[in-house]
Amino acid sequence: MALHVKGSKRFLHNPIKLNPPQFLAMLFLFLIFMGTCLLKLPVAHEKALSWVDAFFIATSAATVTGLATVDPGTTFTLFGEIVILFLIQVGGLGVMSFASLVVIMMGRKISIKQRVLMQEALNQPSIGGVIRLVRNLFLFSISIQAIAVFFLSLRWVPDMGFLKGVYYSIFHVISAYNNAGFALWPDGLMGYVGDPMVNMVISLLFITGGIGFTVLVDLWVSRQWKKLSLHSKVMIMSTLVINILAILLFYLFEFNNPKTLGMLTGTDKLWAAYFQGVSPRTAGFNSIDMTAINPDTSLLMVLLMFVGAGSTSTGGGIKLTTFVVILFTVSAFLKGKEDTVIMRRTIRNAVVYRALAITTISILFIFVALFLVTYVQKDTSFMLILFEVISAFGTVGLSMGLTPDLTLIGKIVICTVMVFGKLGPLTLAFSLAKQTKENIRYPDGEVFTG
């Protein structure tokens, strides 16, 4: 007996059409699904690994976060670690950018539709120059990572031997540049808290990856401060200011803590303050015990993780430029000015609205995630939950020890937050909302605020 479904022919001839944000979200979810299946293979892990943990690690790697419910260094085999590296590299460069590179290397032309997808993935204002940006992105990434592997190998090969030293260098370079925060030691980089080479190479990698690809390309092309775009100038200046403040405050807050900086002496204390001060906005590496930091330090890190890295970077958060635009908009309002001005340039209202939308959607989403995790983690301190959720949202990967103790629902919620933080609030909002254009101008109304 034949089964006829009303409208089935029309559905076959008119398949579901996805807009760019929806397509990118689906592509990203497919990457996570593929990574989960590969990590669950017997050849990928030495210890027992549940489907939920495999999914969590795949999500964390693809979103370049670094949170882990199991210890990657002892749980996974060489094959499993290579799968994690692949997810990190693809997730860091962007699924669409990586796919476009493959197409370019095959000598095929990039269609207009693919250019639009790349424009959406790289957060560019137009499709012009996106192919050149992808090429430059790839060349910059490979060159910087190759140089970093060389320097880390000089440090680790004498201690570990050639093969292991080079492999550990490659793993941590890819993890650092893509702001993933995965390490092959259970205590992160605590064993190298005062090591100048490891501290400088790893930190420069995640600062470079977190500043944004467009800024790096602009620096390479312009090579003069006056010729840089406003975005590049804002990113460079704000990164410098916020990193200096974070280092000084971390040093001040933890100076007498006997379990963190207090137990260190001499230059080790300075290196630890520097590394842990610049790490929270972008990467999840730690050189001190994160479970022992003071409450004021944890609040500082929560703020830094929420702000995040730069636009078109490998990091998450609301983005540093979004934070700067909001600060200058508030300043303009308090001074009675109508326009937001940064470095003698007026910021368009559309950019201000976008910054407000990003921040508002992010706060609402974080509040829902906090409510759910707090509900399922009954006996857990709220500060640990807040730190975990914001770390997942900022795709940072730092944890105060909660990750391995997450319940099943807690793991799923944190995975959702990581995906949300990686794709961005507006990308997901645009993928769900129906876009309409209205040219109707309604009469003014008055609403009392404040």
Image (spheres, helix red, strand yellow):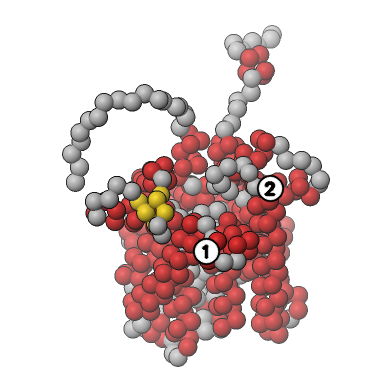
Locate residue 28 relative to residue 254 in the image: left or right: right
Mark 1 belongs to which amino acid?
A: Lys
User: Which label number is shown at residue 207?
Assistant: none
Instruction: Tell whether 364 sits left or right of 39.
Output: left
Residue drawn at 19 percent across, 46 percent down: 450
Give me the residue at 51% from left, 81% from top.
193
Q: Give the residue at x 55% y 78%.
A: 199
Q: Secondary structure at mark 1?
A: helix
Is any part of residue 37 visible from this angle?
Answer: no
Locate residue 420, reporting x and y percent. 48, 47
Vertical position of residue 180 compared to residue 262: above or below = above
- The answer to the question of whether label 2 and label 1 lie on touching residues, with beta carbons closer than 8 A, is no
Q: Position of residue 345 (x, y in %)?
A: 42, 54
Which mark identifies residue 226?
1
Mark 2 residue crowding within 10 angstroms, few (<14) / some (14–19) / many (20+): some
Q: Quadrant of the N terminus?
A: top right
The amino acid at mark 2 is Ile
Q: In the picture provided, is 355 more to the left or to the right than 233?
A: left
Residue placed furthest toward the right? 107
The vertical placement of 243 against 381, above or below, is below
**Circle on res. 131:** 2
| Residue in front for this viewpoint, 29 or 45 | 29
Image location of residue 412, percent across then percent down: 48, 48
Neighbour tally class for label 1: few under 14, some 14-19, many 20 plus, Cα within 10 Å: few
Mark 2, secondary structure of its residue: helix
Q: Tell which of 221 and 23 is nearer to you.
A: 221
Observer-side mark, 2 or 1, equals 1
Report the front residue among 191 and 354. 354
- Residue drawn at (38%, 46%) of the image: 352
Q: Earlier in the sequence, mark 2 or mark 1?
A: 2
Quadrant hosting residue 83: bottom right
Q: Is residue 89 above or below residue 25?
A: below
